[in-house]
Amino acid sequence: MIAAVRRRPRRAVPALLLTTGLLLAGCGGAADGGTEAHDHSAGAPAVVEGPEDRYAGIDLPESYRKPTFTLTDTTGAPYDFRAATAGRPTLLFFGYTNCPDICPTTMADVAVALRGVDPALVEQMQVVFVTTDPATDTPEVLGEYLDRFDADLATSFVGLTGDQDAIDQAQLSAGVEMAEDEGRLHSTLLLLYGTDDEARVAFDAGNTAEDIAGDLRLVTGA
């Protein structure tokens, strides 16, 4: 397990992370990789930064399929991530509502990015925030938190929670490092899946809303 990583300049990815997995951060303080997408359901963490530099975000060395997991949304209903987002451009992030920096900044950047792209594209988008602190983040708490960011958008952000085992499995399936310290040490990566249900690019704290908007247009051809 890699140590906590704070904010860093965009694209300066340490070589160590190429083999250990996606970045972690403590809150409080791909280029096209071939014809087959990688499936993380077996639990191996994704690696970051492919050999090319196509995107403003972090090029993944190979594409990653949308994971399969079912959690509870803000209405209390089951949410099958893969089925609910199939064929739709999707942003996936793992964090928690009491996070004072990485999580609200990421969600705010997503909101700003979506305000800068075609409204027709925004209507297709799914933005999914999975809590890493299910003991605190009930459906009601998640709903109130995400309403701060999506109130004026043509799509509503989806908040998901569940029991700890289900949260852990969702992270493993997505290929991100599992959160530690009761969810407060978690992956910083925001994954972008295209309409083919594969992710070739991700973003971290070094990226901007403009990076997200530009890569969203590139991925969707909008």
Image (tube, rainbow, N blue to C red):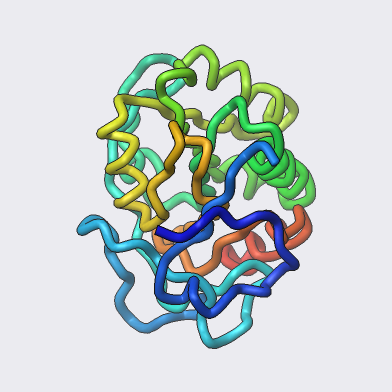
Residue shown at the point (31%, 69%) measured from the top left: 38
Whether residue 214 is situated above or below residue 144 in the rendered picture: below
Nearer to the camera, 56 or 97: 97
Residue 31 visible in image: yes
Whether residue 147 is situated above or below residue 125 in the rendered picture: above
Whether residue 119 is situated above or below residue 9 in the rendered picture: above
Residue shown at the point (54%, 15%) measured from the top left: 141
Residue 172: where, in percent of width, then height?
A: 31, 51
Residue 219: where, in percent of width, then height?
A: 57, 66
Residue 119 visible in image: no
Nearer to the camera, 222 or 219: 219
Residue shown at the point (47%, 50%) measured from the top left: 88
| 173 relative position to 204: left or right | left
Residue 51: where, in percent of width, then height?
A: 53, 87
| 102 relative position to 187: left or right | right
Residue 114: where, in percent of width, then height?
A: 71, 46
Nearer to the camera, 11 or 196: 11
- Which quarter of the rendering shows the N terminus? bottom left
Residue that lies at the very extreme toward the left in this rendered image: 42
